[in-house]
Amino acid sequence: MLVATRKYFHSAADLLGLEKSARRILLTPYRTVKVELVVEGDNGSLLQFIGHRVQHDNSRGPMKGGLRYHPTVDEDHAGALAALMTWKTAVVDVPFGGAKGGINCDPATLSRRELSAVTREFIAHLHDVIGPNIDIPAPDINTNTEIMGWIMDEYSKYSGFTPGCVTGKPLQLFGSEGRTEATGRGVMYCLESALERDGKALAGRTISIQGFGNVGSNAARLMAERGGKVVAVADQYGAVANPQGLDIPQLMAHTRKAGTVKGFADAEALASADILSVPAEVFIPAALEDAITTDNMKQVTAQYIVEAANGPTTPEAHEYLVSQGKVIIPDILANAGGVTVSYFEWVQNIQQFSWDYERVVQELEKKMKKAYRDVQRLADDYEVDLRRAAFMLGITRVGQASSARLQGAGALVPSRRGK
Ligand code: NAD
């Protein structure tokens, strides 16, 4: 992950003509925090974990990014994801920087009380270096609205009532309408923009989706409501396909009960890994990193790949797919709907004025479609793919803000070369 994000950064930095020193400044995290967390387990034994928070850049605003609870969480991984957040918030032009972090625990092995205790211990260690004007955590893998509520409660013990210290909260604790579906909705807006450019509509397009959790299922539901034909869906246990289009509300109901898409009636059962080769015009990876690699890139049938997951395509697979004329809408653009509605939540918390669902949806559509246009324009000007263009846009915006802050310093990012 770290290697891939660095490669993408340098490829865009080459096109922008960035000096070595500028690259170093832009890549080095602002602050890295590593803390020991010891809490009492339900059986009286002591549980020990390590918590990480990498705060990558704050030149455009307070740092923003998720908290992941997973045994693989470490500083390098959090650092790579934190940098992606910096470019992502700049691409959608919300006034945030980037951060990421988490705890190296497996929540499946913890009781609710233990999970709450370890979360609160983490915030007790972090409260001086996070906050609504410093760094604002959000949910990520294995963290949810309830955990965000605990974070708000714990932080408020130190600083008084501060709902803007975290986003992705429950509605009754000042969360935002439309936050749960925001990433899937943003994915749909990006796809609509790409199709529109090619003179096509979403209605009638065949779509396959890897991952049927929050992002994958909401993207499927919203696209099906607009006439998209979701012909295959995979999760970690298996896949289901129907060339006539799956009934998404029924599939969601089935998944809620069965815990997997497997066993859904009216569909052919496939192995999870077969999802790439199902004939479809659009493929949406919405599960894990490194989903498309040199091992399986030749199986991809779709013309449009919309990266709902973070880092689903390795650099080698990316180059291959682009050389085949495929359109890849990169993660830092495609899945930015989540952080955009997190921004709306923060704005509502600061103003103590709630927006209704319709307003959230309207503002999200405006932000996502504007970001798509900005990236596409750069891609056209420089004759590069959308990923290079998105990184160029993010790096330019962050570099310009950093230069403006560094008194007397030269520009980190040279102005555009007559383009
Ligand atoms: P989730 O935990 O709700 O769902 C993950 C889904 O992926 C599940 O259906 C799971 O079964 C499936 N999956 C796991 N391993 C798989 C495999 N090997 N093959 C096929 N499917 C597999 O997670 P989510 O919140 O939907 O996030 C999905 C991705 O989107 C992650 O990469 C996440 O970082 C990214 N993302 C999420 C948000 C958000 O707002 N939730 C925002 C930006 C990016």
Image (cartoon, helix red, strand yellow):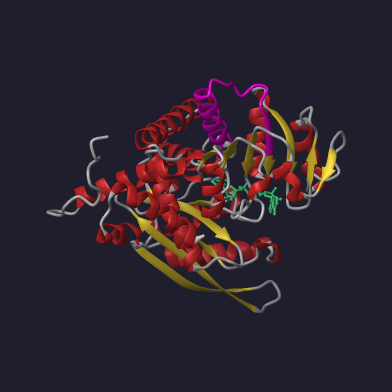
- Say whether residue 28 is left or right of residue 122: left
Of residues 382 and 340, the one nearer the viewer is 382
Instruction: Using the image as rendered, state which of residue 157 and residue 2 is in the foreground.
Output: 2
> At 41% from the left edge and 30% from the top edge, which residue is drawn?
373
Q: Is residue 300 left or right of residue 60?
A: right
Residue 354, given in percent of the width and then of the height, sits at: 47, 32
Residue 282 visible in image: yes
**Residue 181 in the image: x percent, y percent?**
59, 37
**What residue is drawn where x is 80% and y is 41%?**
240
Q: Quadrant of residue 88?
A: top left
Image height of 11 relative to 322, above or below: below
| Vertical side of 148 occupied by 367: above or below | above
Residue 204 lies in the magenta stretch: yes
In magenta, the rendered stretch is: 182-208
Residue 213 sits above or below residue 304 on the image? below
User: Is 393 in front, or is 380?
Assistant: 380
Residue 116 percent coordinates (x, y): 60, 61
**x 47%, y 40%: residue:** 333
Is residue 68 rendered magenta in the image? no
